[in-house]
Amino acid sequence: MRKNKNNYAVWSTRVKKKTSSTFKKAGSSINIDKRLYKEDIKGSIVHTEMLYKQKIISIKTKDKILWGLNRIKNEIEKRKFKFDISMEDIHMNIESRLFELIGDDAGFMHTARSRNDQVLTDLKMWMKDSVNEIDKLLLRVIKSLLNNSQKNIKTILPGFTHLKNAQPISLSHYFLSCVEMFNRDKKRFKNSYDSLNENPLGVCAISGTSFKIDRWYTTKKLKFSKPTNNSIDTVSDRDFVLDFLYNVAVCTMHISRISEELIIWNSDQFNFIKLKDNLVTGSSIMPQKKNPDTLEYLRGKTGVSYGSLISMLTIVKGLPLSYFKDLQDDKELVFNSFDTLKNSLLIFDEVLKGLIVNKAQMLNAASKGYITATDLADSMVKNLNITFRESYKITSRIVNFAERLNLSLEDINLDQMKDIDKRLNNEILEQTKLKNSVNSKKSYGGTSFENIKKMINKLKKEIK
Ligand code: ARG
């Protein structure tokens, strides 16, 4: 066990017995929070510079500390740094090594600071970068969706409600619906930036400090936008963690819903799509199999991100203000959620690039289930000057008739139609054609081909 200069924990003058070794092991977070080393060192450098600027420490001390911190960063990056679980977390590991490197002057670094504000500063810095990374990945997915959309403007498939044929749609319109989901995710992550941008450093343990620190200086140097307002709230607050975990949960849920749809489309019964071979796995026993494991992975991982959100909500639920050790688990949850989402977005993007669309099968499926019955009813309203409720009834009779004779709407001839209602004519029947149906949905946001083309252009402009 490597320790500070006294070879004891910093609180050993007060706490006389050694901490239970089981607890030391279990309660140590170094294996998780070593991921924050860069942010921790950056935070310490800026904090030390501020202490010097405010004449709280001498230039000599400042220079020694900065030299030590840079050296530690180097050691970690060259994998020469020995992380020690008995030093609990990243903050104590670095401080302890600083003592080894520069001696007693290391003791000045923690002036006007507590691990309570330190850990929050590190985590917020880390999360800001992560949110930017997620934003880039979301953009990549949106581009792939727009690309798929561009290629499938005239691809017609059944749109479902209740998984029953509802109305024909363009596949392009389906992909554009996914773009909307991910654009909302982007916005949600962007909104979370406001609270991530508030600098916790300087609130110390709970009440602030009597040292004349400059929180605006550290705010600027660490690229935050303002210091947090209240020291008690700052060390207690994990809302920004909850926001992040919620945003990840929603985004993985979007991926999961689309994955589920694609799994259905990929089934032998639907046969709407295939996946390129790099996206499927085989079976250890059934030689014919190509299973969509990638999509199932994406659907399954949503459970992990929901778990993180519920865990964090539960952790804070009964916590009085302010800091408690319970909060230490926030980082593991954030890291897990981030890793899960990052992998999911990368894999989902590969799926989008490896989709093979069976256009003929989609069209074939769209010709079933009297999918243009609503168009027929709409057309009667326009041509016969009757109410929609009346045309709905006439159309129901036509569907009943067709079903009895096992015909599609297009198969019924005009004479048969006229037997049901003599006002019907060919113009009205034209609307039962799939293409006409899709192309007639010109209302803003509808699936007509021209709407889609305009929307693709608009969305492409927006991401430039
Ligand atoms: N490792 C701790 C955490 O992540 C750092 C803050 C510790 N503060 C304390 N008073 N024990 O929460």
Image (cartoon, helix red, strand yellow):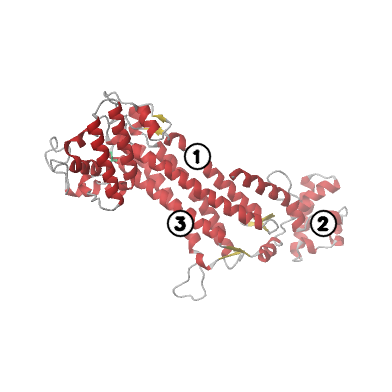
Query: Is 1 displayed left or right of 212 in the figure?
Result: left
Helix, strand or loop at label 2? It is helix
- Residue 36: percent from left, percent from top: 33, 44
Classed neighbour count for the residue bearing mark 2: other residues with Cα under 10 Å, few (<14), some (14–19), many (≥20): many
Q: CA distance from mark 3 to mark 1?
A: 26 Å
The answer as to whether callout 3 falls within 8 Å of ligand 1 is no
Q: Nearer the viewer, residue 212 or 426?
A: 212
Query: Measured along the vertical axis of the image, is residue 203 above or below residue 345?
Result: above
Mark 3 or 2 closer to N-term? 3
- Taking the spot 11% from the left edge, 38% from the top edge, the residue there is 16
**In the rendered image, which residue does mark 3 sit on?**
300
Residue 91 seen anywhere in this rendered image of the structure = no
**In the rendered image, which residue does mark 2 sit on?**
429
The residue type indicated by label 2 comes to: Leu
Number of the front mark, 3 or 1:
1
Query: Is 191 displayed left or right of 268 in the figure?
Result: left
Q: Quadrant of the C terminus?
A: top right
